Amino acid sequence: MVRAAAKLFREHGYNGVGIDRIMQAVGLTRGGFYNHFASKQALFAEVLRWDKDFVVRMRARDPDALAEQGLAIATDYLDPRHRMAVGPNCPFTTLTPDVVRAGDEATDAFTETVQALIREFERGLDNPKKDDERALVATALC
C-alpha cells in the first residue's frame, strides 16, 4: 500500500489522490485502508519515512563506497531529468511541496527522514578531506 501510494502521490500530488484510488491500486476496499492507517495524512507520513533506511541498506552492501555512492546520488538527484520524473524516484523531488499542506505528521516525518539520511551520509564522509562532498550531499538532500 505504501509503495502504491508513493507512486500515486508522486504522479498526482497529495491532493490529487484519494483513499479510494490508492486502495483500488492495491486491489483492496476503502474499509481495508483503516486497518492499516488512521488517515490519508498518516499514510503520506509513512510514504515520507519509507526511504529513511535507504542509506543504511547502502552502507550494509558496501561501507567503503558510501561517500562515492552519496555523491553519485546527489549528482543524479540534482539532474533535471530526475527532478521531472514521477516514477520510482525519490519522493522528495515531487512531494516536498505537499508536505506542509499535509499537516504536522507529514512535516515531522519529512524532517525526521531528511535528518536521518543526512546523518547516514555524514557517517560515510568522516574524512576531513571530504568536507566539500559532505556539503554537496547535505545540500542535495535539503
Image (cartoon, grey):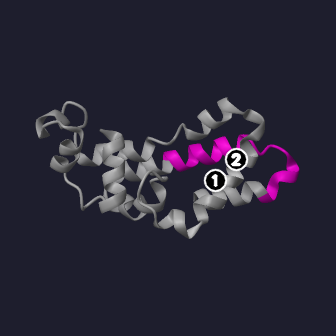
Quarter of the figure with residue 38: top left
The numbered disc on residue 69 is 2
The amino acid type of the residue labelled 2 equals: Gln
Q: Residue at x 23, y 46 (%)?
A: 22
Estimate the x, y position of residue 25 in percent, counting from the top left.
23, 44
Whether pointer 1 and pointer 2 mark residues with C-beta atoms closer than 8 Å, the reply is yes
Q: Residue at x 37, y 50 (%)?
A: 106
38 to 95, vertically: above or below: above
Tell me what residue is drawn at x 72 percent, y 40 percent: 123
On the image, the x and y values in percent for residue 82 come to 53, 62
Q: Which residues are magenta?
A: 112-132
Which quadrant holds residue 85?
Answer: bottom left
Residue plotted at (63% across, 53% down): 73
Dot label at residue 122? none
Q: Above or below — where is 47 with respect to 134?
A: above
- Secondary structure mostly seen in magenta is helix
